[in-house]
Image (cartoon, rainbow, N blue to C red):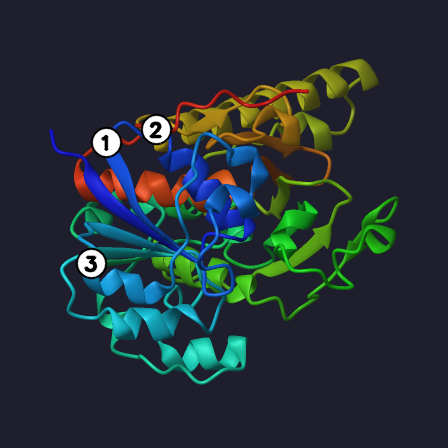
Amino acid sequence: MQKKKIGVIGATGYTGSEIVRILSQHPGVEIALITSESRAGEKFSDVHPFFQGIVDDLLYTADKVDDTELDLVFLALPHGVSMDYVKRFAGRDFRIVDFSGDFRLKNPKVYEQWYSKKHIFPEGFRDAVYGLPELYADKIRDAKLVANPGCFPTGAILSIAPLVRAGAIKTEGIIIDSKTGVTGAGIKASAVNMFSNVNDNFKAYGIKTHRHTIEIQNILDDVDGSLAPVQFTPHLLPVDRGILTTVYARPAEEAGWLDVASGSKATGSTEAATAAKVVASMDSGKKRLEDMYRDFYDDKPFVRICEKPPTLKDVRASNYCNIFVDYDDRTGNVIVISAIDNLVKGAAGLAVQNMNVMFGFDETTGLGHVPVNP
């Protein structure tokens, strides 16, 4: 089979180098073009020395697209920049996977509200498909433009989608708490990612206003249709890569999925008997939740339902999303914890997964990397 010819526009950042790393080991594709406006004329391995002798391709400006045969282009560009290229490439034969947030939301109006920037190509929203294969593989397969999800939304949506789809939780009061490694801030130096500000430190940011809030909300609304506003708060960890997300939600009593043991509230029972019933209730709730998640992700190769809460190193440098789900009988909360690598499942790996679906490859092709631990 002839290999698909791939272009990577903007390959000098973290996600750009990560997509090249994965594509360089993909048996079904050939990297036909790598671009950088600021480093054109240099070798890719000059910018990223760890590619020496592996990917030494010359970097070109994006104008080189005009005389290069391509089947698909990855746009590893910032928000507000990608839309320029999607507009420029409209009508071309190749397909596009866009890493930015420019086409992830419902419409230009919502985008402008949350990104504080005028959208110059609203026509693109008609064709854009949200690139989460675990939910939208059928649409991705024939898509011309795929909007690769944000890193936080990927972990959050995969964490809670089974509960929302089943109507197993109340639609209001959902809290999503996420922690990310510093590579989520990008490769350019700033006060945010300075060593002195990150090392031995931990902070919340974007409280109430982070743009990934509306992305999470939009997709969960699409899954359910009646979700109340979710509370999302991101935090910055002093680590290189990874996202750990914890979700709290209340069970929907009418769903009937959880038969809470009445013994925990009963009077006249011995303390030991009451404790035993509480434990039995918790075990039953956890088992039902795990079964729900395993059924939902039964044919999804990159989602792993875990017996213990996942850690970042359980998924580091891989395309896996590890999920742990539990029920707390004492508080009445459903608790879901997920872990992903923000540069792989949260960006480049997910983009390749989308490409595989678009080209009819096995979804796992080129993505069989075992997590790096320690």
* Cα distance between the residues tagged 2 and 1: 8 Å
Which residue is at 67% across, 33% downward? 329
- Look at label 1 and name its amino acid: Gly
Is the Cβ of the residue at disc 2 closer than 8 Å to that at disc 1? yes
| Residue 275 as seen in the image, left or right of residue 254 | right
- Look at label 3 and name its amino acid: Lys
Kind of element beneath mark 1? loop
| Residue 181 as seen in the image, left or right of residue 68 | right
Which quadrant holds the N terminus? top left
Q: Count neighbours of disc 3 (C-alpha within 10 A) and say few if under 14, some if 14 to 19, many if 20 or more.
A: many
Of label 3 and label 1, which has the lower sequence position? 1
Q: Count neighbours of disc 1 (C-alpha within 10 A) and say few if under 14, some if 14 to 19, many if 20 or more.
A: some
Of label 2 and label 1, which has the lower sequence position? 1
Kind of element beneath mark 3? loop
* Cα distance between the residues tagged 3 and 1: 19 Å
The residue that mark 1 highlights is: 28
Query: Looking at the picture, how far across and down is residue 19, in whole percent?
Result: 43, 43
The residue that mark 2 highlights is: 366
Query: Looking at the picture, how far across and down is residue 358, in whole percent?
Result: 21, 44
- Look at label 2 and name its amino acid: Gly
Q: Count neighbours of disc 2 (C-alpha within 10 A) and say few if under 14, some if 14 to 19, many if 20 or more.
A: many
Nearer-the-camera pick, 372 or 9: 9
Which quadrant holds the C terminus? top right
Q: Quadrant of residue 296?
A: top left
How many marks the image carries: the answer is 3
* Cα distance between the residues tagged 3 and 2: 22 Å
Is the Cβ of the residue at disc 3 closer than 8 Å to that at disc 2? no
Q: Determine which of the numbered discs, if any, sits on residue 144 in the image.
A: 3
Q: Determine which of the numbered discs, if any, sits on residue 191 in the image.
A: none
Which residue is at 35% across, 40% downward? 352
Of label 3 and label 2, which has the lower sequence position? 3
Query: Looking at the picture, how far across and down is residue 135, in whole percent?
Result: 32, 45
